[in-house]
Image (spheres, rainbow, N blue to C red):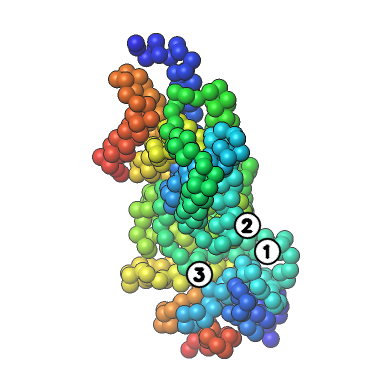
Amino acid sequence: MSIIDYLQIPVFQRAFIAALLAGGALSLLGTVIVVQNLTTIRFALMHVALLGGAVGLILGSSPLTGATVAIVLGSCLLGPVSQRLRLEPGLIGAFFMTGSMAIAFLLFYRAGVPAMDVFGLFAGSILTLTSLDLWVMGVLGFVVVAVFAVLFREIQLVFYDREQAEWLGMPAKKIENVLLFLAGMSIGVAMKIVGALLIDAIILLPALTAIRLARTFLQLLIYTSVVGMMTTLGGLLLSMVIDLPTGATIATVGACLLGCSWLFRR
Amino acid sequence: MVGECEMALECRLAEAGYGREAILRNLELRVRHKEFVAILGDNGAGKTTLFRAILHLLPKQRGTFRVLGRQIRSKEDQAWIRSQVGYVPQRQEKGRFPISVFDAVLLGRWGKTFSYFRRPGREDRRAVDHMLALIGLEALRNQDCRNLSGGQMQRLNIARALVREPRILLLDEPATHLDAEAQSILSDLVRGIRDHSDLTVLMISHDRIQAEAMADRVVYIRQGSLHASPVAVP
């Protein structure tokens, strides 16, 4: 089958649109994670999702519903909790990660929750997305792009000099919390596309690649988006052509692009 | 006797600090228009806290403040201070992410001429280009800030504070971590700007010789005594 033949099939059509949205828009949140050094929050949210999945099963719901609710709550809480405790969000991420994992294991033990059903959350696939998933991704992608477009200078100043942003009267904490929330939501969506273990391919690697090549903030955003789309679309199409697992191929393409960026470093 | 209107800054701090314990107590400081005051003191004496008090950034702050003759009481007054004061903080990290020299200086005008839905205009860009020329960074206009030297970075920070067109400039140890040549360039720059403008300058320094050479007056904040002792420069 050729790529054109594949794209006649609704499953691949949805996957193609999802690759465009995730690579083009959600990858922008990777810049927040890289610049603010928040690499632990993606692990934290994965484990919060695990806890949510366990709670979902106990309440008779699907693990995915529980995980989604947990990610939304976790994303909302990360920023305010870190500001309340005056700890960096990265450190709070470690607290969330350990705490939620520990409670999840206690629930597995006491409530007799089948752990393997919950761990299934970690294995996502872009080929299993529903129309509802696409809508959620589309709305989230639109919000992400709109936030970066409207708050372009504000985000730039918070990234560059948070102290000055604050003394100029900018609500730096609120802006950081909005970005943290969107980053958390994007991690949740990326988990559905490539599985929790390969989230970095969509969220982190494009931003890491772009930050090596860009000279300005605008370039950083454009390069991140382009590299994100090259990663997700390239991985998807490559997996179709040579019949490889999609998530792993997407992650491999992302890693190769990051490797190439070392060759073209400024 | 100096009249009220001749004062750029008057503060009678009853107390100011971050937590329960006040760092500054009974501190009085009066700075005339166009005066260049250097502030010296040991580590932890409260020099940076004084700047933060002037900017009304402290959670705990009691006393009387008059900036350019205006008593600071409300949030509107604080917003007004931001439009009148340029601040160069001590922290001098280059940051992790790419930003051009032009953009970094342009951000100094946030809240003064642009913010949120009001984007920077031609006048803002002209002001930035003028400031880059004044500060000697015009050749590096499109350079990534991550590639600047410590001295260039410090000049950029001063340009970012001055591009707001403030009437008072606060410099928190601008020459720290710079080599002798960069310190000399920076001193000439600050003196030159001050000599050719109506700017009032307050500068925190650890270097007494440099402070006395640059400033009209040197003020000491001594840990424990918590008051300013003006010392005339010969």
From the image, which quarter does the N terminus of chain B lie in? bottom right
Q: Amino acid at mark 1?
A: Gln
Can the viewer see residue A207 in this picture? Answer: no
Crowdedness near tag 2: few (<14), some (14–19) or many (≥20) residues, C-alpha within 10 Å: few
Q: Which circle marks residue A169 in the picture?
A: 2
- Same chain for mark 1 and mark 2? The answer is no
Q: Label 2 to label 3, Cα distance in Å?
A: 19 Å
Q: Nearer the viewer, residue B107 or B213?
A: B107
Quadrant of the rendered image containing residue A152: top right
Circle 3 or circle 1, nearest the eye: 1
Q: Are marks 1 and 2 in contact (CB under 8 Å)?
A: yes
Q: Residue at the spot x=73%, y=71% of the render?
A: B71
Identify the residue under disc 1. Answer: B78
For disc 3, the neighbor class at 10 Å (few under 14, some 14 to 19, many from 20) is: many
Q: Which mark is residue B171?
A: 3
Left or right side of B8 for A89: left
What is the chain letter for disc 3? B
